[in-house]
Image (spheres, coloured by chain):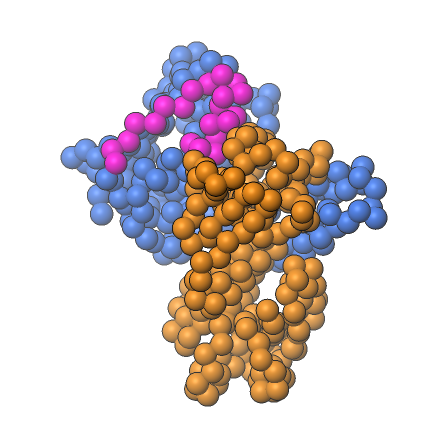
Amino acid sequence: MKEFFDEFLHEIKTPLAIMRSHLESEIGNERIPLEVRQKLVLDIEEIARVNHLVNEMKVIIQSQRALPQLELEEVSFLALLIDVVELLSPIAQENNQNIELNAHENITLVMDAKRIKQLCYNLINNAMKYSSTGARIEVSLYSSTEGIELHIKDNGIGISKENQAKIFDQFFRVSSKKEGSGLGLSVVSAIVSMHKAQMSLESTLGKGSEFCILFPQS
Amino acid sequence: MRILVVDDEQKLRENICTLLKSHNYEAEGSSSGEKALDRLYEQHFDLIILDIMMEEMSGLEMLKLLREAQNSITVLMLSARDRIEDKIEGLDIGADDYMSKPFSNLELLARVRSLLRRESQSKSVKLFYKDLILDQSLRSVERAGAVLDITAKQFKILELFLMNRDIVFTKLQLSEHLWGEECTMRSTNAIDAHLKNLRKKVGVEVIETMRSIGYICRSV
Ligand SMILES: Nc1ncnc2c1ncn2[C@@H]1O[C@H](COP(=O)(O)OP(=O)(O)OP(=O)(O)O)[C@@H](O)[C@H]1O
Ligand SMILES: [Mg+2]
């Protein structure tokens, strides 16, 4: 069954990649009217969206394996966080939000960097998405006696006790006001478990949320 | 630069060749390992793009034969899946790099470029746009003689544009190039901001906006 899923997802990704590459090669073709090419760009983004969903499913399925395939390397955690914050800060600025990064400089962790980047991206992106303009998002990283702790805290809309238990479920969303598929946090928990880390959540409706991830010290 | 693309899947082989040709490489396809070995006898190539999974002779077998014959040509391996075993075996036998299918055009071009650059032994390579000079080995950018204060990401975007004149890049391609596939969804808007900052530093005329399509750097 599991093998079947791998095969299946791969069979979806291949035609997507072919379609995308065909469309991309026409983007600069000046014999095609500009309006048509503008539509092609939107089509490419849709293809990428499906591909992204497939990738998310892949991570979730992977995490349920006894031996998930990780590409482990020792990485500077701060550098990785700076990278993600650099990507998201222009969007934050547009919404007058402020991402504050407090991290100990010398923390390294043996991790699958791509996956951890995705985890950080999903959590910081959520913090921004579910907060109003002018919000403050705090990202902190430090090592404690228990391991390496990553905290992502917002003063946004918060999550009710009842929903806190559900938000990690696949496709669950509290409301559909904002764009999204409801897979982001499932991917986060999958990545957490693949790294043998632990995640906790503290949140108060109307006040804000704090996601905390504890990585075992390597 | 001459590249030999070895893959028994015709569609993919032709796709890769077309892509490479449109980026001014000389590319040629081979449908099997045997044919490829024959071609390598007759003609000098700078790089082989080699599929692992082929019907008759597998890519790994072909690579083994090549290396046994003391041929040290640069080889980029392709495999059907993220199979770490294949990757390790390929690199053990002497592949220079490895990529799993499916991959994006940009990813392939980036690998090819970096492999070919490695091959020409990191001579100081400079890219020019009017009075703008980008030094790939020093990783610095100068404009009218003054060194610009530029971030690593900005360098990476500028390098991409200067190396690929007259080619349109979409925001999606740019954000994947900079941050990878994992964190690009819904953040293509951020790319506009990053490009705006870059253009402020290097001069707005270097990178042109094509509305609702992307960005382009034209040859001067
Ligand atoms: N920081 C947060 N503050 C308040 N609510 C949140 C926060 N993070 C997540 N949620 C709630 O949990 C739900 C699930 O989050 P999740 O990231 O899995 O999906 P999503 O953000 O809706 O979509 P996507 O798949 O694009 O991430 C969200 O729809 C939102 O209702
Ligand atoms: Mg989300």
Q: Is residue A98 visible?
A: yes
Tell me what residue is drawn at x 62 percent, y 39 percent. Answer: B207
Q: Position of residue A53 (x, y in %)?
A: 57, 43
Q: Which chain is blue?
A: A
Residue A81: x and y in percent read 37, 36
Quick one: B194 or A18, which is closer to the camera? B194
**Is residue B7 shown left or right of residue B125?**
right
Residue range (magenta): A84-105
Quadrant of residue A40 within the rendered picture: top right
x, y percentage for residue B199? Answer: 57, 33
Residue B16 seen in this snapshot: no
Residue at 61% in and 82% down? B43
According to the colouring, which chain is orange? B
> Would you identify the image quadrant in which residue A211 lies?
top left
Task: Say whether residue B205 is magenta.
Answer: no
Residue B199, relative to residue A130: is it above or below? below
Residue A89: say if magenta: yes
Residue B47, above or below A85: below
Q: Is residue B137 above or below residue B57?
A: above
In-front residue for pair A54/A137: A137
Tell me where residue A96 appears, x and y as whole percent: 49, 16
Which residue is the extreme one toward the top? A206
